[in-house]
């Protein structure tokens, strides 16, 4: 009766786990591509802090002199403005807004929005006051007055390309001439060289600045395993402490240490400012209305009449491709590769990603590459598994002698421990040898799991075209849509797909193959735990489920082989299991007679 009550309680708790998991996933990890909020922000309340959403005040205590434009603004209308300079690079396209000298239109030529060929490229930057506003700005402060974003700049070219830089110029009435020379490379990096020339009669105090302004409405979810939000390297340490919600609770956040770079990260995309020579301050701030900004402001310089100053800053706007980030790091941007949330096991994850990409280049299918990588990893770990089973077999062999020692010295625990240790030494048995292989495997499998989470290379890659067209998305063939026969998608924990079913079956078989003796309650839990995990894992990316299913199949094969090599393990476990069942039957019988 107690076991039945415990079993019912475990089933009920498991059901609550499934429902709670789904609710939590929807609450804390919503879809990344959501519509931007149109919630109105009180301009007076925002202006009291010096920050009006849609403006670009560098610091809360500096005047902006800007009247915010009425919004929202239609994206197409904003991009049709003739005051724009086109951007045409190998991997980026878009335009520069001559009003305010903003880079506010960037799309990726190599990455589509969806798996459909006509879905259009991924857009990262969009103009101010559009639904998904996200832009960078390079500007100036002169005598504590900001050169506002309503200023119209002139350009010396109509198109920014790798071979053709563009210089933006503005001549102010006070004799100061401002210029911003923009260049772009073959990948995702732009450089802005900001110059101020003083043709006036008196000295001026000038400060170049740069910023990134974005909404969080279309941001990736900030998860334990993958950070999304403010990011940067300060004093040689990656700072991923603050999510957007955390930033809402403070006026501004200035990490300790000098910034190597700072910006905003999503799971796959990154925008970052890389400061040049000179002293500067850097910070993150929330502007209200789901608008956030990263600031980089250089120290004020007194510019005498007839003199000029120059300041360079780099802007990365692109995909978080490990090889590209590492190349920029090698070129001099310290710790730029840390923009990918590698975590503790980076020394394992980076080689695994390199191996995965190599396999993908060789076989031409990312799903097959995942399978091959899992096979290779399990193959390399097989000798460790062999040692683990050999240790288990040795421990089983000395069990009778251990029980005899425990019985003989049951009243003298110290002597009992001494004799057991002597037994281990005489029989050359290490009781920890069975645990050590498991401790070695855990970081490796966690690293492989995280690689599949982080790898942008898996995005929009198919396993087979008629079934899984995107390994970074959940399995589209679910039980409720009759495995793809019905024309609708099932999301959440009810979206039990083919891979989720295979995960449950292979895990159940793995538990069944393990002959370790367990009490009835443990046995019941292990019987339905695979099906609980089937629900929990169903919403995950198909590539991750493919990895787990492959790993489970290899575990089954490995266990079958090793048990055949160590039959004493199975025999001892089955004997122990039979003895427990017999003892349980006798106990139940005695209870019935009583």
Image (cartoon, grey):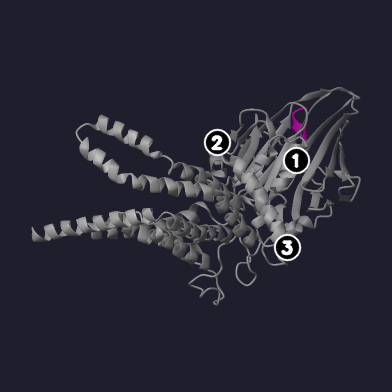
In-front residue for pair 200/178: 178
Q: Earlier in the sequence, mark 1 or mark 2?
A: 2
Q: CA distance from mark 3 to mark 1?
A: 27 Å
Q: Position of residue 96 (x, y in %)?
A: 80, 49
Q: Magenta segment: does it hold 536?
A: no
Choose the circle earlier in sequence order: 3 or 1. Answer: 3
Mark 3 or mark 1, whichever is nearer to me: 1
Give the Cα distance between marks 2 and 3: 37 Å
Residue drawn at x 78%, y 37% is 331
Q: Relative to 48, does residue 580 appear above or below in the rendering?
A: below
Kindly state the secondary structure of the residue where label 2 is placed. loop
Q: Is residue 495 visible?
A: no
In the image, which disc is placed on residue 120?
Answer: 3
Residue 328 got which mark?
1
Side (left or right) of 197 relative to 439:
right
Residue 45 in picture, x, y percent from top left: 58, 40
Q: Residue at x 80, y 58 (%)?
A: 80
Mark 2 vs 3: CB contact within 8 A: no
Q: Residue at x 29, y 41 (%)?
A: 402
Q: CA distance from mark 1 to mark 2?
A: 32 Å
State which quarter of the image contains the C terminus: bottom left
Label annotation for residue 250: 2
* Closer mark to the observer between disc 1 and disc 2: 1
Q: Quadrant of residue 313?
A: top right
Q: Residues within 10 Å of mark 3 (few under 14, many from 20)?
A: some
* x then y, percent, for residue 317: 73, 47
Q: Which residues are magenta?
A: 140-149
């Amino acid at each position: 009766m107690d076991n039945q009550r415990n079993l019912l309680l475990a089933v009920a708790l498991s059901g609550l786990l499934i429902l709670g998991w789904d609710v939590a996933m929807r609450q804390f990890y919503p879809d990344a591509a959501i519509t931007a909020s149109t919630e109105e922000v009180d301009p007076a309340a925002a202006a009291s802090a010096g920050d009006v959403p849609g403006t670009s005040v560098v610091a809360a205590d500096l005047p902006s002199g800007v009247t915010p434009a009425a919004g929202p603004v239609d994206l197409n209308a904003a991009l049709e403005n003739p005051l724009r300079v086109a951007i045409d690079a190998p991997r980026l396209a878009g335009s520069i807004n001559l009003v305010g000298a903003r880079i506010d239109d960037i799309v990726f030529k190599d990455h589509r929005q969806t798996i459909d060929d006509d879905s259009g490229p991924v857009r990262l930057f969009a103009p101010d006051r559009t639904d998904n506003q996200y832009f960078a700005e390079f500007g100036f402060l002169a005598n504590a007055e900001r050169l506002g974003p309503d200023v119209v700049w002139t350009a010396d070219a109509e198109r920014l390309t790798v071979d053709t830089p563009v210089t933006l110029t503005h001549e102010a009435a006070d004799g100061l001439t401002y210029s911003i020379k923009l260049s772009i490379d073959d990948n995702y990096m732009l450089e802005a060289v900001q110059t101020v020339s003083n043709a006036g009669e008196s000295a001026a105090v000038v400060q170049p600045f740069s910023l990134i302004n974005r909404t969080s409405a279309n941001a990736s979810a900030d998860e334990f395993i993958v950070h999304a939000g403010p990011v940067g390297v300060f004093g040689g340490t990656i700072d991923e402490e603050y999510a957007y919600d955390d930033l809402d609770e403070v006026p501004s956040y200035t990490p300790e240490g000098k910034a190597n770079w700072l910006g905003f990260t999503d799971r796959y995309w990154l925008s970052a400012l890389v400061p040049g020579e000179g002293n500067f301050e850097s910070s993150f701030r929330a502007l209200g209305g789901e608008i956030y900004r990263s600031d980089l402001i250089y120290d004020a310089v007194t510019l005498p009449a007839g003199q000029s100053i120059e300041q360079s800053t780099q802007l990365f706007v692109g995909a978080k491709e490990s090889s590209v980030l590492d190349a920029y790091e090698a070129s001099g941007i310290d710790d730029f590769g840390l923009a990918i949330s590698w975590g503790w096991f980076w020394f394992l994850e980076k080689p695994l990603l390199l191996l995965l990409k190599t396999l993908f280049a060789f076989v031409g299918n990312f799903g097959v590459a995942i399978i091959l990588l899992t096979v290779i990893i399990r193959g390399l770990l097989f000798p460790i598994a062999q040692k683990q089973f050999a240790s288990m077999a040795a421990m089983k062999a000395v069990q009778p002698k251990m029980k005899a020692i425990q019985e003989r010295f049951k009243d003298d625990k110290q002597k009992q421990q001494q004799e057991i240790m002597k037994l281990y030494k005489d029989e050359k048995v290490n009781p920890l040898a069975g645990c050590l292989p498991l401790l070695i495997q855990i970081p490796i499998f966690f690293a492989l799991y995280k690689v599949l989470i982080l790898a942008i290379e898996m995005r929009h890659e198919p396993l087979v075209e008629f079934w899984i067209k995107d390994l970074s998305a959940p399995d589209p063939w679910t039980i409720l849509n009759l495995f793809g026969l019905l024309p609708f998608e099932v999301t959440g924990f009810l979206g039990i797909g083919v891979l989720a079913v295979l995960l449950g079956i292979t895990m159940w078989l793995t538990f069944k193959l393990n002959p370790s003796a367990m009490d009835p309650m443990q046995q019941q839990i292990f019987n339905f735990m695979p099906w609980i995990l089937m629900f929990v894992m169903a919403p995950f990316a198909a590539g991750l489920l493919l990895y787990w299913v492959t790993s489970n199949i290899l575990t089954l094969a490995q266990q079958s082989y090793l048990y055949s090599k160590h039959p004493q393990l199975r025999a001892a476990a089955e004997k122990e299991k039979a003895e427990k069942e017999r003892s349980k039957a006798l106990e139940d019988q005695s209870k019935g007679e009583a």
